Structures are given as structure tokens and as C-alpha cells.
Image (cartoon, rainbow, N blue to C red):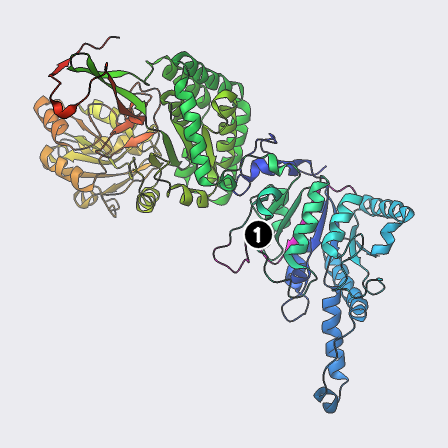
Amino acid sequence: MPTRTTGTTRQGELEAADGNSMDSTRAFVRDVKRLVVKVGTAVVTRADGRLALGRLGAVCEQIKELNLQGYEVILVTSGAVGVGRQRLRYRKLVNSSFADLQKPQVELDGKACAAVGQSSLMALYDTLFSQLDVTSAQLLVTDHDFGSKDFRKQLNETVQSLLSLTVIPIFNENDAVSTRKAPYEDSSGIFWDNDSLAALLALELKADLLILLSDVEGLYSGPPSDPKSRLIRTYIKERHQGEITFGDKSRVGRGGMTAKVNAAVNAAKAGIPVVITSGYASGNILKVLQGEDIGTLFHRDAHLWVQSKDVSAREMAVAARESSRILQAISSEDRRKILLEIADALEANQEQIMNENEADVAAAEKAGYERSLIARLALKPGKITSLANSIRVLAKMEDPIGRVLKKTELADGLVLEKTSSPLGVLLIVFESRPEALVQIASLAVRSGNGLLLKGGKEAKRSNTILHKVITDAIPDSIGGRLIGLVTSREEITDLLKLDDVIDLVIPRGSNKLVSQIKESTKIPVLGHADGICHIYVDKSANMEMANRIIVDAKVDYPAACNAVETLLLHKDLVPAGGLNAIVFGLRSKGVTLYGGPKVSSILNIPQAQSFHHEYNSMACTIETVDDVHEAIDHIHQHGSAHTDCIIAEDDEVAETFLSQVDSAAVFHNASTRFCDGARFGLGAEVGISTSRIHARGPVGVEGLLTTRWILRGNGQVVDGDKGVTYTHRDLPIQS
């Protein structure tokens, strides 16, 4: 049996039709055993009409690999007429006199071209496959043949016999004896070109998949050469049929993309998935079978799949807002139950979640991603249980929606209330960490907000299964699109323009990501760009405590944004042995040290290229300062206003540090790793904000709320303030 790729199996509620979540929409590849591969003329030949040996060789190598994996591969090839025409033109040129060349040149007979080209093309396939120790067989068919039931029966028996012997059947229309008027003009009959022949054979021979190789990546919304055209990942006839503008026909073949789409639509309607992809790119056939995000998919159930891009970014955001209003309208107890259902669902699906995450980690390692990214990507043992418990803590917290924050009597019988209210629709863009999806989604439910999530491509499988588990736990009455999973960068571009629908963007990732988003939108952005956290060790510090805190702040989770990146030591600790003790403690844990100008010369270690650097790994910078004031100045100059800590026994020095360091979180004698929403008792966090407006530090439920004013009266009017006596009296808030 063929090897299978892993992925989620839920059909009918899958994510992208124009996005990149191929592990869901292309999960069907796990059930493929027999496939038909059609190679277009533009793939077979070069622009000058000669055979494209490199491309054909790559196709043959992939088919050889599929054979070894146990797949049954049937090849349909075009190109015979083009190859024959090129050879006959050359022959005619060689045999022509100079006078003959001066005469008007008559177009060569297509059937003669087909006869000559078929033998040349098949000879090449035979040579290429023989070099790979693979046997191939030629089967020439005509449209007329398929009118016979006996022919069809014999065709199936022959192909089955060849496949059982691991022989590759190679089909081509026998244009040389076809009853068509001309190979490129007559499109009547049961099939009318090699694309429709491939679709017919896929149906007749009960194939599980049809792959149509073209000279472009797939189906575009317009001519591929037009910069405005976009690649359609999954074709939905009801949406795409009227909006696609086809370009010119194939430069050498019969029908180009139009013919491929027609064939693909017909095959998909009959229940055979079809992928149109490029035959120019190496390995695309294998990538399709691995469920990778390439080409355009045609599938019978495509119209059932939830699609964010094709529904339009605006509709996606509006749907999230509408669902959030339904969520806000239900009782506090019902919202609490939803959170508990999500927590239970995560634990119930823990094995599947971990399997998908392990697949992401393996793919990231294979792709050569940095170790720090892989560390953030991996869900550690017990993480799902920890996340579920955090959600349960969140569920037990006081309902944040509609709380009366202030109550004022404006005048007799006129009472004003300031109440908490959801922001509306949140767009969260995060990299690497799949657990962020769970934390953010649970906070959105608790705070009554609609949510659009865009995770990093490296966590595609993890995010897809987590999104599925969470949304399945939300009642249908709330709406299936309360939490949307954005699947492509193009969708983000569109969403960032919707400042009238989306209320807040929270990017969680690199400095580059945050900067790009801030520059691309008018929507308020909440977040931090870097996590350059400092620990200052004062001369009054308890060194045993200092070593314990520093090791924890660096080693506990080096890839976290709250891990320490720079150590500042009072200069008096150098002769007292404090510097050496700290260096020994870190090195014994495998931490690589870089020095500032002073420490690098003292310890003879490499000098840090910049003090403003986030390692996200087992490395940190170390430098000495004269006193707490120089430490504060250093933090303000090189830090990121995230989390900074002082280790000191001198309370006056500690208070100076705590009051003057302008960071979101400032600690005394405690690890920077405590800067976390769950550890702060917030239940979870959407991120840590270094902004100074709205929310700062770990952002939990309260950071996702705004306020509304509720005024209750009994007929009062302003009337120039003549009939109102203002009291502006604070009233007690009833619990």
C-alpha cells in the first residue's frame, strides 16, 4: 500500500478554498492508490518545439518513486503532434532547394505530424524509464474506441494487467488515425483533447486522483502574466466560474487552461479529485501526494468547505462580529459552559493534537528552521492539560461583560453607569506558538469578542486541529464563524484594510512582523516588538538568590519573550567574585555568553554585536555598570520596555529601580519568567503589550474590553440646561 501523509480528516467543514491549509482540504490524498497523471504539451516541449528532456526526466523520476511507494500510476501524454511537426519541418528544410524555400510554406498535415511524433515521443519515454529500471507501455486510443463496451472492458483488463506488473501505461490520443477533421480544430465526441481523455480514463479506470501538469502553477483568476491575478487554491464552481478571465490558449497544445478546467470540473463532479499544477517545478507530483499546498484543487465537496478568502475578508470579519453579538447576549453561565466544553474537548483530543504538532515539528526540522523557532513550535508533554486547566480558571473568574465600573447620579432620577464591554472583533497574528491559539480563543469567548486568527505556516497542522477542536465545542446557535482561521498572507492584507469592521490587531511575533503590521493598517495595534529583558544585580544582592533567579530566567524557557537576554552587574561584584559565580552557573547549564565592552575583555569572551538583541536561545549578554542609575539608563537605551528585574537587598536601591524603569513589568528579586498572564492569575493572555495606551503588560480579559455608558432617566431633556439641576453624585455599585 502507498505511504500516507497524516492530517485532519474532517470534510465539509474544512478551512481554505483559496488559502493554504492543505492538510485539511487535501486530506483525501491519504486514500489515493491509483492516479492518472497528464503531461501537457507545454511541459513536454520547449518553446522551439524540441523535447524538454529535463522536465520529462523529472516527471519519470517522480513516477518511479511513486511506483516504489506502491502507487498505481497511469500516464497520459500530449506532445506527439508538436514533436512530429518540429521533426517534419526539419526534414522538409533539409530536402528543400533554395527555390522551394522562396515559395509560400504550406502548413504540415497534423495527422502526419502525429504519426511521426508518436514514435519519437514514446521512444523517449521508453529510454527515460529504462534508465530508471521501469517498464512502460504505449496505448493509443481514439474517441471512436470508447463507443464500444467491449473496448472499455478490454481496456480495463489490459491496464489492470500492466499495473499488476508495475508497468506504466502511457496513453495518447491516436491523432494519426482519428476521425476528427483536424487534431486542433474538432472538439466533438466523447473526449476532445488529452485533458478530457485523462479525465475520461480516470473515471473509466476508477482512479482516486487526477493530476494535470501545466506550464503555470495552477488556475489563476486572470491571465498568469497579469500581476493582479491570484492563484486559486480550491476551485468552487459557484464562485469562480464567472470571475475567471482566461488568457491565450496554449502556445503548442490544443486548449490550454480552459480545456484543463473543463476536464477537471467534469472529473471532480464524477467524484475524482483533480489538481492542476506546474510540470515545470521539480517534485510537484510527489508534493501533491504529500498533501502540500501547491496548484489548484477541484473537488466534488469544495462548495461545502468554509472558505475565508472567497467569502471575502469583509464577510469573514462581519460574520465574526455578528457571532460575537450573539455570544454577548447569552447568559454568563452559558458562556462559562462553553469554556468548560472547550477545555474538555482539548483533553479529549489530546492525542490527535500532539500527533499534528509532532508533524509540524518534524517538517520544521526538515526545513532547517532555527532551534528557537522549533522550541516555540513544540507542545511539551502536559501542555494541553495545562492549557485546559487555564481555561477552567478563566471560566471561574467573574464575568467581565457588563460589569458596572462607576455609577453616578447626574440629576434627580437621571443615573449614569459606566460598564465594561467587548471591543468587538480582534485580529491576532502570531508566529510559531500553537498554544497561543488556545489562549487567545478562550479569552475571546470569555470577553465576548469575535476573533480572526492567523498563525505561522510552520504551525499549520497544529493550528488547524486546535481551531477545529475549539470551534466544534462552540454551540451552533452562536455561529460557526465566531473564531475564524485565516490561512494566507493575502487575506491578512485585505483584513488590515477593514478599520470599520475590525477593532484591534494584536501581532505576536518578530519585530519585523509587528513593524510591518503597524505600517499596513489604520486599525489600532497592540503588542510588543521585542522581548529584551534585563536583570540588574546590585552589589547588595544575595548572590545565591541571584544565581537561582538568573538561571531560571534564562534556562526555564529560552525562546520565551520573558526570558532574560541581558545581565547587568554592579562593578563591585567583579573583584568580589560575583561575576565569576554567575558565569559559572550559566555555563554549567549550557548558556553561551557574550560580553559588553568591559566584560568581554575581563572574561575573554566574544563581544555582543548589539545590546539591543533578543537571542531566544541559550545565550545572553553580560556587562557591568557603575550603579543602579547607569543600569536604568542602559535599560532605557537598549531595552524593549517588556520586563526588567533588579536583584538587591538594599530596599532604597530597589525602589529607585522599580519606580524609574519605564517597562510594562518591573520585578524585585523574582524571575522575569513570572511575566505571564496565567502566572498573573489572568487565566490566559493574548500577548504582552509594551504599548502605553489601553493595556500594558500581559493582556488578559480586561485588556480585551472597553467601556460603554448607560444612562437611565424618566423623561429628562436638556433644553439649554434650564430645567436640570445637576447633582453629579457618586452612587454605590451593587455587587
Task: Residue under label 1, please give it.
Answer: 244
Q: Position of residue 64 (x, y in %)?
A: 70, 50
Q: Position of residue 544 (x, y in %)?
A: 21, 23
Is residue 137 one of those drawn in magenta? no
Is residue 221 one of those drawn in magenta? yes
473 or 322, which lies in front? Answer: 322
Tell me the quarter of the image containing the C terminus: top left
Residue 426: image quadrant is top left
The answer to whether residue 199 is visible is yes
Q: Position of residue 306 (x, y in %)?
A: 54, 34
Q: Position of residue 324 (x, y in %)?
A: 41, 25
Residue 90, relative to residue 321: is it above or below?
Answer: below
205 or 629, which lies in front? Answer: 205
Q: Range of the magenta residues?
A: 206-229
**Crowd class of label 1 (few under 14; some 14 to 19; many from 20; radius 10 Å):** some
Name the residue type under label 1: Ile
